[in-house]
Amino acid sequence: MMKMRNKSRENSKTKKLFNFNGVNHLAMVTGDMDKTIRFWRDLLGMRLVAGLGKTGYRHYFFQLSDTDLVAFFEWADTESVPHKDHGRPVKGPFIFDHVSFGVESEEELWKLKDRLEAAGYSVSDVIDHGFIHSIYSFDPNGIPIEFSANVPGRDIREKPTIVDSDPSQVTLEGPEPIPEKWPAIKKPTPESKRIVYPGAGSELFHGKRKMK
């Protein structure tokens, strides 16, 4: 186990660069929004909270938590991808392996496993990763998904831990951000030029008017 500057969040003297509050939304793609709604809303229980578009092009949002959303574009010519085992290395251009959704307890994890299997979806055994227990499956679009329950007393956010037999020098610098590794802001955008332009979704609330 490599040694790191292992400060907890409470004891860290590093000032936060930004106050991130979660994943606002993770945008994925489907060729069949109805099947996607059936899976994410009706099987997993995520509320469908926003939707816009028309036949052949839609953008819908499902509520994952109080701060996080899962979104899908529906593109008419999109096809489901072949299943690739989570974490299996590939060659060539590639950008996304899988996404893991946290659940509150191991009881919830087993309940999810049973519900997915009852609906005819293939689900892995429960896997012990040390700090989380997980199950693995796929949504109707072939998107690899994981569900994870934290192991009590093993919070890597509180106690960062890396086991790497050959860590890079950048890794050895530790868990805390080092902002000075990047150029400082020299010309912040003045308030007079902070213009927000309408984009997809703005019509849900204020038509084509410029947002203020």
Image (cartoon, grey):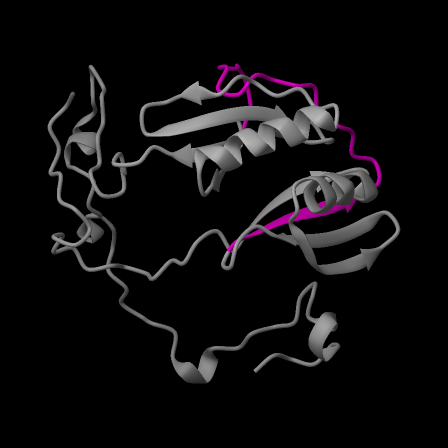
Q: Position of residue 143 (x, y in %)?
A: 64, 30
Q: Which one is in front, 92 or 65? A: 65
The residue segment tinted magenta is 68-95
Instruction: Please indicate whether residue 200 sits to the left or right of residue 8 in the image.
Output: right
Q: Number of marks in the image? A: 0
Q: Residue at x 61, y 17 (%)?
A: 84
Q: Is residue 100 visible?
A: no
Q: Is residue 200 visible?
A: yes
Q: Residue at x 11, y 28 (%)?
A: 3
Magenta-span inclusion, residue 86: yes
Q: Which one is in front, 62 or 149? A: 149
Q: Position of residue 59 (x, y in %)?
A: 73, 53
The furthest residue to the bottom: 192
Instruction: Please indicate whether residue 207 sits to the left or right of residue 171 in the image.
Output: right
The furthest residue to the front: 107
Above/below status of 182 relative to 136: below
Above/below status of 212 relative to 105: below
Q: Position of residue 2 (x, y in %)?
A: 14, 23
Residue 130, located in which quarter of the rendered image? Answer: top left
Q: Residue at x 59, y 27 (%)?
A: 113
Quadrant (top left/top right/bottom left/bottom right) for the C terminus: bottom right
Quadrant (top left/top right/bottom left/bottom right) for the N terminus: top left
Majority secondary structure in the magenta region: loop
Q: Position of residue 60 (x, y in %)?
A: 71, 53
Instruction: Please indicate whether residue 89 sits to the left or right of residue 51 in the image.
Output: left
Instruction: Please indicate whether residue 16 sits to the left or right of residue 29 in the image.
Output: left
Residue 106, located in which quarter of the rendered image? Answer: top left
Magenta-span inclusion, residue 152: no
Q: Residue at x 19, y 48 (%)?
A: 178
Q: Which one is in front, 176 or 37? A: 37
